[in-house]
Image (tube, rainbow, N blue to C red):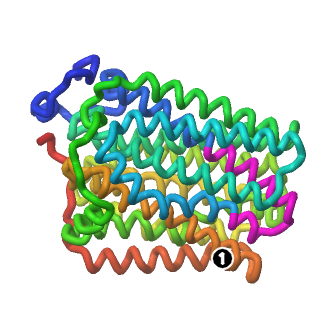
Amino acid sequence: MKLATSNAGKTNTDRSQNVAQPTMLDILRSYRDFRMLSAGTVGSQAGQWILNIALAWLMLELTDSALYVGLLGFAAGIPMVLVAVPAGVLLDRYDRRTVLIACQVGMVAVGTALLAAITSGVATAELLLAAMFCYGGLMSLNNAARQTIVPATVPRIALPAAFGLTSAATHASRVVGPSVAGLLIGVSGVSVAVVFQLAVVTGSLIASLMLSSDIEGARRQTSTGGLLDGFSYVRNHRVVLHLTLLAAIPMFFIFPYLQLLPVIARDVLKIGPDGLGLLLAVSGVGAVTGGLLTERAARIGPLGLFVLLATIAYGGIALIVAFSTSTWLTAGAIFSASLTGSAFQSLNNTLFQLQLDDDVRGRVTGVYMLGFGAFALGGLPMGYLADLQGTAFAISSGAMASSAFALLLLFMSPDLRALRKPANH
């Protein structure tokens, strides 16, 4: 299939022509801005994961506490709750590309300050928590900006493939980045891992600078809406509300188990930092696979039903992670959980974005991004339960709660169950 070689100057009319559904390779080959956006996504997400791993290991060395490791994840994620809605207003009022670039400059600055503190030996648990809070706020705005720009870079019919690739790009950073970070921590220490983090975030900044300055949908917006407009939209659109809830449920109850992988690696499996890198790499491979399978999954009829069932299955697989004491069984379960979770997130996000008009996309996406911040809120009780009752109890409790709530939505939301793949209009 032949597509245009550039998305610069395309109009909405051009993008709504009836064409065959493009593949992932088609959109990568044909849309330069989407390529740059994806490259920047890999770098920014890799930087976050590398920093998470490096600081989690350092926090464990400083405090010897699973609770403090959970607090670190909480500090990184709580800004997603605090910043998401104001971020949506900014993205509807100002040039989205400019906002994205400013975020990444800030991320480089925070990483540089952390490196200076670690190499000088003045890093403390409190400093790590403060730094991750700042970094989490920048990542929240960064992620929201990328979500709102994706629909401006490809035709509507290509959105499942585009969001699948975006998910794959996001999780690909967990394949190479964390495994290299684990190796660097084991061989050279945390400071070298932070240097690596700075390098990939700088690369992400360069990719964002290469986005077209006049990219459609990313230019200065004319909206004058306020903070509560996104909530009003979600409340008044039942399917959008249910998709938002479905995004938040596993993020709160299951996803925080990744923050406890340092505890699992050290105390349950006894495989050290190199083994931690392996587990995170396996998780990344599973998530990339899930993202790449999104295009095929999007061809099925009852796409909403598929998303609901995938969410329920995600909790079941997480139970294996909770109780396994075998490295290989744990790795296999993490691969399967990450595959299922990635496919669910990509398809849920696609269905969500297809419900929105561009003039409210930023504000409503800001509300949606609150669900991604839910993993930080879930990280604190999961870390607390892990300290009190062990990691198996903490992870399994969250997994069962997530599947139960998703099952409830399955029966309560016939409109969500009936959602199908997008048409090109």
Question: Is the residue 124 above or below the residue 320 in the image?
Answer: above
Q: Please state if 111 lies on the left or on the right of 312 as rendered.
A: right
Residue at label 1? Answer: 394
The quarter of the picture where residue 246 lies is: bottom left
Who's the residue at 26% across and 24% down the image?
7
Q: Position of residue 184 (x, y in %)?
A: 80, 38
At 38% from the left edge and 34% from the top edge, which residue is drawn?
Answer: 97
Residue type for callout 1: Ala
* Screen quadrant of the C terminus: top left
* Residue 79: image location, x then y, percent: 54, 59
The x and y percentages for residue 412 are 27, 79
**Residue bounds of the magenta highlight:** 48-71
Is 62 within the magenta?
yes
Q: Quadrant of the N terminus?
A: top left
- From where the camera sits, is residue 329 visible? no
Q: Is residue 46 left or right of residue 192?
A: left
Side of 211 where 130 appears, left or right: right
Secondary structure predominantly adopted by residues drawn in magenta: helix
In the figure, residue 158 lies in which quadrant? top left
Between residue 123 and residue 418, name the one nearer to us.
123
Q: Nearer the viewer, residue 64 or 105?
A: 105
In the rendered structure, does residue 176 fall within the stretch colored magenta? no
Dot 1: what SS?
A: helix
Relative to 420, does residue 171 appear above or below in the rendering? above
Q: Quick one: label 1, few (<14), some, or many (20+) residues within 10 Å? A: many
- Which residue does the image show at 19% across and 25% down from the upper left? 10
Q: Residue at x 74, y 44 (%)?
A: 114
Query: Left or right: 416 with respect to 317?
Result: left
Position of residue 306 measured from the top left corner of the image (x, y, whole percent): 32, 61
Q: Can residue 243 be seen here? A: yes
